[in-house]
């Protein structure tokens, strides 16, 4: 590790990002701001002039990881500026302020203004005012390793799901103007990205926030020259319209991969969570997706151990996930978040119960993804290759989001190849490139 000397010319910055894709795209844009100002990006854990931690507060696990990262940053860069930004910073600034080494605490709106505060004196600076402005973000080359790029089209959320702290952390829903989304996308394409993933907190609220229906934005993006693949991030089931499905269906650039949060397979729990759909509605939307995209990969978030969740209610979630063609399970044990409606409920479940239900559903999810992978064997897939793994195999994703490995002496990074899936290995595929 190089030491930083007083006359070092090039300043160094290290990043660590926690949480959702949105956070990653925001770090991407902030890191571009640093490189534009002449900084070198170094790995987190290396000594740096600035350490930027983009935090998450969606669970108490995320909170404690953030605190550990702050300690690690201070150990590796005792002389550097330690910036703690994002959702956890927004919600828990006073707690973070007590931690040794922290120089700057920037909330969800202020994190983009980091450059305004970097030169402030050695006093701790806390900026957590929320703003109704929309700050655009895209991943860039400096966000190591990705060949998929993330384009932020929406932020914040106007829903009031009882368990969720995000509306408090990120504020009201707002969105990027369609013209700006298109110009950001053009820039990503020009920088060489072949795939764009649309991200936001609740992208189904795009129309409410921008005045333009989401399907129209998607339609325009799909027409962009040079864009080869477009993937949607998570979309609330009640916001998936027929128009959106038909626009996606009309273009081979649209990936047959959907992420539709379920949260629970029990009507009573869904109601208590203040979700905007019933089990029957959820079923209907998944059936519709499959009718139009028969080989789709479908991801679903599920919260287990919501306050008062009975064994039977948990089974309803398990059984719904089993019956429906959900392929990618994202299982979260319910985490009590301060100042949310659900946190005030008295019938909180014991940690051990939540842990066991999470384990059961996750294991089942793994088995289901393996079955889906098995089902893909013997088919041809278009795969966007990302990197070479330690065994020398090239890895990438199919359109329906199954990881594929192939052997090749060519450099496949960021190339789309037709691959024949020869066999399944756990949740992944082993294939052969067809020339
Ligand atoms: S839709 Fe519900 S769960 Fe998703 S961010 Fe908004 S409040 Fe949270």
Image (cartoon, helix red, strand yellow):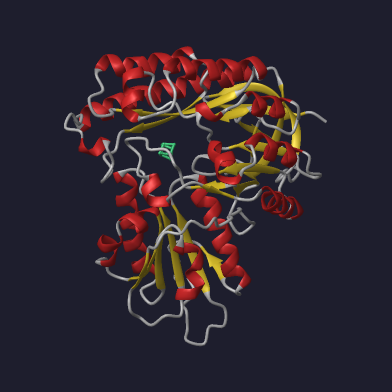
Task: Using the rendered view, name the quadrant where residue 316 is placed.
Answer: top left
Which residue is pictured at 53% across the width and 39% down the height? 205
Q: In which quarter of the image is residue 79?
A: bottom left
Q: Where is residue 169 in the image (x, y as percent from the top left)?
A: 38, 51
Residue 33 vertical placement versus 384 (above, below): below
Image quadrant of ligand 1 equals top left
| Residue at x-position 59% and y-position 55% | 136
For the C terminus, the image quarter is top right
Residue 65 to residue 294: above or below:
below
User: Is residue 233 depicted above or below 276 in this figure?
Assistant: below
Is 39 left, or right, of 116 in this rendering? right
Q: Where is residue 7 in the image (x, y as percent from the top left)?
A: 52, 87
Front residue of this view, candidates 315 and 260 = 260
Query: Is there any visible trace of residue 396 in the rendered image?
Result: no
Q: Which residue lies furthest to the left in this view?
A: 346
Q: Position of residue 347 (x, y in %)?
A: 18, 29
Residue at 43% x, 63% y is: 45
Q: Residue 394: x and y, percent?
A: 66, 39
Q: How many marks?
A: 0
Q: In this view, does 359 lie to the left or right of 289?
A: left
Q: In this view, does 406 lie above or below 105?
A: above
Write down the quadrant of residue 218 in the picture: top right
Nearer to us in this view, 111 or 101: 111
Q: Which residue lies furthest to the bottom in this view?
A: 7
Residue 190 visible to the viewer? yes
């Amino acid at each position: 590790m190089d030491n930083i000397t007083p006359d070092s010319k090039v300043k160094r910055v290290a990043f660590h990002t926690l949480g959702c894709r949105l956070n990653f795209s925001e770090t991407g844009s902030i890191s571009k701001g640093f490189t534009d100002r002449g900084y070198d990006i170094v790995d987190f854990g290396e000594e740096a002039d600035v350490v930027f931690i983009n935090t998450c507060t969606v669970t108490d696990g995320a909170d404690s990881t953030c605190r550990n990262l702050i300690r690690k940053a201070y150990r590796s860069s005792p002389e550097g500026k330690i910036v703690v930004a994002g959702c956890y910073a927004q919600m828990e600034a006073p707690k973070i302020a007590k931690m040794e080494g922290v120089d700057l605490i920037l909330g969800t709106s202020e994190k983009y203004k980091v450059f305004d505060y970097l030169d402030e004196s050695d006093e701790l600076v806390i900026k957590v005012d929320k703003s109704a402005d929309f700050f655009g973000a895209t991943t860039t080359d400096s966000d190591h390793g990705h060949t998929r790029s993330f384009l932020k089209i929406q932020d914040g959320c106007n829903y009031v799901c009882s368990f969720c702290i995000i509306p408090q952390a990120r504020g009201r829903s707002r969105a990027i103007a369609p013209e700006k989304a298109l110009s950001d996308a053009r820039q990503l394409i020009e920088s060489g990205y072949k795939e764009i993933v649309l991200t936001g907190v609740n992208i189904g609220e795009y129309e409410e926030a921008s005045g333009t229906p989401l399907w129209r934005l998607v339609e325009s993006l799909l027409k962009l020259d040079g864009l080869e693949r477009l993937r949607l991030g998570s979309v609330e089931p009640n916001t998936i319209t027929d128009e959106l499905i038909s626009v996606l269906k009309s273009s081979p650039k649209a990936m047959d991969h959907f992420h539709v949060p379920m949260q629970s397979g029990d009507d009573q729990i869904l109601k208590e969570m203040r979700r905007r759909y019933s089990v029957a509605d959820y079923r209907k939307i998944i059936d519709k997706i499959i009718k139009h995209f028969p080989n789709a990969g479908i991801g679903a978030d599920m919260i287990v151990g919501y306050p008062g969740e009975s064994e039977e209610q948990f089974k309803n979630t398990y059984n719904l996930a089993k019956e429906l063609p959900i392929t990618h399970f994202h299982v979260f044990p319910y985490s009590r978040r301060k100042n949310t409606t659900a946190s005030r409920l008295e019938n909180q479940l014991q940690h051990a119960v939540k842990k066991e239900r999470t384990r059961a559903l996750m294991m089942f999810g793994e088995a289901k993804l393996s079955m889906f992978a098995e089902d893909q064997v013997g088919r041809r897939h278009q795969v966007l290759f990302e990197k070479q793994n330690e065994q020398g195999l090239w890895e990438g994703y199919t359109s329906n989001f199954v990881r594929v490995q192939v052997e090749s002496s060519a450099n496949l990074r960021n190339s789309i190849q037709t691959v024949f899936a020869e066999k399944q290995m756990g949740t992944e595929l082993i294939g052969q490139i067809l020339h």
